[in-house]
Image (cartoon, rainbow, N blue to C red):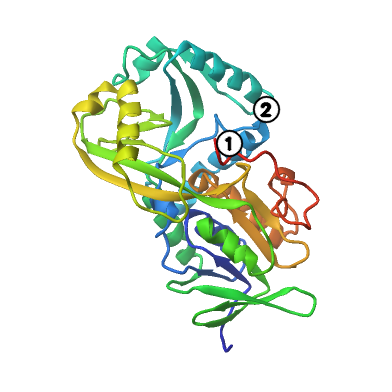
């Protein structure tokens, strides 16, 4: 295959995670090429609910990873100098006394981390913050470090940041395989347009990451999980703070979500999904019963079977790295930091033991945790 381009690092996948990795590498001095089979920001990153969330993710070490990433958001927004409708503060609404106790237990587990700042609040406290909430809610988990954003604006802000840093973007370019030398070291990336010479390749291919990993003989436990979302007509502000399943955009639209469906590579929506989402939303925010739904969409989360992302180098394929998992909007900054650390410095100060990319592979030294895909 003819070599069409030379670069230091190829990042496969131009969603929020891939763009963040390319941005971090380029600003640290690397020559980077970003490759996507369709185009930047055409996959899961722009078909998502838009949360920047950490408080409810377990174990507490995984919560910390998300929290460290969310704390990188202000730094990156300053660098990118764009408004992506980012706001801090989040609520997970609780509808029953039993669920309130369960969320309280979660808070106690998360307090194993000194970084955690979440706390339970009463129903009246939650309604003081969110005037649109039902008087029947029992309370909420409040966390000042949770929040939300416009994921489309965020992804394209990252892409524009990449271009300002000199990243070459190759859209409509499918990866067919990897060129490995005699020592199994990455020497290039084989695409439908030709060979791109590079000593490093990063698999940030989202829901397609398992197939891209198989191109170097690596197995990861990943499946596409469908999430359906409803969007209502715009109304005056009734939910000024982000919530985990019902939130109001800066323009006044109510976003309601989201399903968790193991249906393969199926991007369709369903009446059943819409009904389930709408009923759940109405229990928390009664006004939505009277609103017109102007859009229903679905996206596919790249969901690890044990719930934890795959992040790191593949030792037996020097120069090959994997960075994939759900919560890509939240985790995109930390993916960029970690992968750029590993490529530029050869190490990172972020603990990665729980996120070993080989934990589903026979060569892995750490085994995967319990299967969460049915939950």
Against 68, residue 152 (above or below) is below
Image quarter of the C terminus: top right
Image quarter of the N terminus: bottom right
Q: Which residue is mark 2?
A: 113
Q: Could you say which is closer to the camera, residue 201 or residue 342?
A: 201
Q: What residue appears at the point 72 percent right and 50 percent down from the top-left corner?
A: 359
Label 2 near label 1: C-beta < 8 Å?
A: yes
From this viewpoint, is residue 175 visible?
yes
Task: Please tell me in which quadrant of the rendered image residue 211 appears.
Answer: bottom right
From this viewpoint, is residue 81 visible?
no
Q: Could you say which is closer to the camera, residue 298 or residue 65?
A: 298
Against 290, residue 228 (above or below) is below
User: Element at badge 2?
Assistant: loop
User: Element at badge 1?
Assistant: helix
Q: What's the distance in space between the residues labelled 1 and 2, CA to CA?
A: 11 Å
Q: Could you say which is closer to the camera, residue 10 or residue 104?
A: 104
Q: What residue appears at the point 68 percent right and 69 percent down from the top-left corner?
A: 216
Residue furthest out toward the bottom? 2
Number of numbered discs: 2
Q: What residue appears at the point 40 percent right and 57 percent down from the top-left corner?
A: 156
Q: Position of residue 18 (x, y in %)?
A: 53, 59
Horizontally, residue 298 falls left or right of residue 181, namely left
Query: Which numbered disc, 1 or 2, marks the residue that appears first in the sequence?
Result: 1
Horizontally, residue 131 falls left or right of residue 220, namely left
Question: How packed is label 1: few (under 14 Cα within 10 Å), some, or many (20 or more)?
Answer: many
Against 140, residue 320 (above or below) is below
Against 320, residue 120 (above or below) is above
Give the label on residue 319, or none: none
Horizontally, residue 122 falls left or right of residue 32, namely left
Q: Position of residue 183 (x, y in %)?
A: 80, 76
Q: Which residue is mark 1?
A: 67
């Amino acid at each position: 295959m003819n070599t069409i381009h030379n670069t230091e690092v190829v990042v496969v996948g131009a969603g929020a995670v891939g763009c963040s990795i390319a941005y971090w590498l380029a600003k640290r001095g690397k020559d980077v090429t970003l490759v996507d089979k369709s185009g930047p920001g055409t996959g899961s990153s722009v078909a998502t609910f838009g949360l920047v969330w950490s408080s409810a993710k377990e174990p507490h070490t995984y919560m910390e990873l998300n929290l460290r990433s969310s704390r990188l958001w202000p730094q990156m927004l300053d660098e990118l100098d764009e408004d992506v409708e980012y706001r801090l503060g989040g609520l997970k609404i609780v509808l029953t006394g039993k669920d309130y106790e369960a969320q309280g237990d979660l808070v106690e587990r998360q307090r194993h981390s000194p970084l955690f700042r979440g706390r339970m609040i009463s129903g009246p406290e939650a309604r003081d913050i969110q005037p649109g909430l039902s008087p029947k809610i029992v309370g909420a988990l409040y966390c000042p470090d949770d929040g939300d954003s416009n994921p489309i604006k965020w992804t394209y802000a990252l892409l524009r940041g990449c271009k300002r840093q000199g990243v070459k973007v190759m859209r409509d370019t499918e990866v067919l395989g990897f060129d490995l030398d005699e020592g199994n070291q990455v020497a290039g990336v084989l695409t439908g347009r030709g060979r791109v010479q590079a000593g490093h390749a990063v698999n940030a291919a989202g829901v397609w990451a398992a197939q891209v990993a198989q191109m170097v003989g690596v197995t990861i436990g990943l499946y596409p999980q469908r999430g359906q979302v409803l969007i209502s007509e715009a109304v005056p502000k009734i939910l000024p703070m982000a919530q985990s399943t019902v939130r109001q955009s800066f323009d006044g639209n109510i976003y309601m979500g989201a399903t968790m469906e193991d249906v393969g590579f199926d991007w369709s929506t369903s009446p059943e999904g819409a009904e389930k989402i709408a009923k759940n939303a109405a229990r928390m925010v009664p006004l939505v019963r009277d609103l017109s739904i102007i859009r229903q969409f679905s996206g596919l989360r790249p969901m690890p079977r044990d719930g934890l992302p795959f992040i790191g180098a593949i030792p037996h394929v020097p120069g090959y790295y994997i960075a994939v998992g759900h919560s890509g909007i939240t985790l995109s900054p930390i993916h960029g930091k970690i992968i750029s650390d590993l490529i530029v410095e050869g190490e990172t100060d972020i603990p990665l033991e729980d996120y070993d990319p080989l934990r589903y592979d026979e060569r892995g030294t750490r085994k995967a945790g319990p299967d969460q895909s049915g939950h």
